[in-house]
Amino acid sequence: MLLIPAIDLKDGKCVRLKQGDMNNSTTFGEDPAEMARRWLDAGARRLHLVDLNGAFAGKPVNEPAIRAILREVGDEIPVQLGGGIRDLDTIERYLDDGLSYVIIGTAAVKNPGFLKDAASAFGGHIIVGLDAKDGKVATDGWSKLTGHEVVDLARKFEDYGIEGVIYTDIGRDGMLTGVNIDATVRLAQALSIPVIASGGLSNLADIEALCAVESEGVQGVICGRAIYTGDLDFTAGQNRADELNGD
């Protein structure tokens, strides 16, 4: 079970949002590369980056900070990035810079043909980010709710050859209310590719609950607000997961 620290970038700084609200953010660091090193030193085996400005603008905005992170840790652990990725040129540029995985969210929902092309051109590097509320997929930085069912879309995208799915429960993100285990497991059981949980992780009990369903196809969990506020000690969490899963 991978615990994956999230570094959310807004105006070049490390922040956390509550329920995806850009006007409700807390700054946790001025130096993204330093933050990346901190999590690597704490035992992270993968990093999750989000270009928040990019997600809302529909194009990359925080590239300087992202490149700084890749220079700092990109040779040591895999780094995945989502937010504002809407064309193949952007994907190629990020992968050339040392990114391991590109996360496509809104663009996958609105333009499935783009996702299909991306998975074909950059096999092994494309992850789909599905953000949902009450089982329905949201787009555009969570500002628009669609009529698409998460499981239906995920199955369709799996056929394109994507590497995995990150499933975020919008209602829980940044709220420290616990991961939506049931919904995550339902999605994982419907797919043969890995699912990474996101939204609501708050304590060791959540990690233990996720480890119990790892065999269903839940590969890891994105760690956000809890590891920044101190509600969850990242190293202790990863160690506990390793104990439970025999890693």
Image: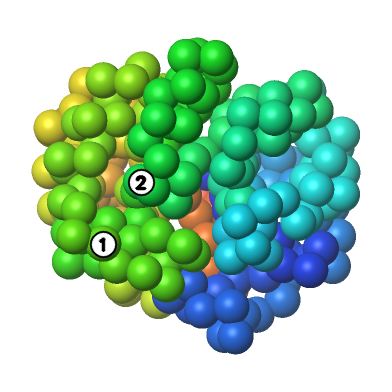
Q: Name the residue under label 1.
A: 146
- Please report the residue visible at 66 percent of the width from the left and 58 percent of the height from the top: 54
Q: Mark 2 points at which residue?
A: 109
Camera-side residue of 207 and 186: 186
Q: In the rendering, at what x and y percent does residue 175 appear?
A: 40, 76
- Please report the residue visible at 26 percent of the width from the left and 20 percent of the height from the top: 159
Camera-side residue of 95 and 188: 95
Labels 2 and 1 touching (C-beta < 8 A)? yes
- Please report the residue visible at 49 percent of the width from the left and 64 percent of the height from the top: 141
Mark 1 lies on a secondary structure that is strand
Q: What residue type is labelled 2?
A: Val
- Please report the residue visible at 72 percent of the width from the left and 67 percent of the height from the top: 10
Mark 2 lies on a secondary structure that is helix
Q: Is residue 230 visible?
A: no
Q: In the rendering, at what x and y percent does residue 211 appear?
A: 28, 40
Q: What residue type is labelled 1?
A: Thr
Chain-order first, disc 2 or disc 1? 2
Crowding at dot 1, Cα within 10 Å, few <14 / some 14-19 / many 20+, comes out as few
The colour mode here is rainbow
Q: Is residue 63 left or right of residue 6?
A: right
Q: Residue 158 carries which label?
A: none
Q: In this view, does 92 lie to the left or right of 58?
A: right
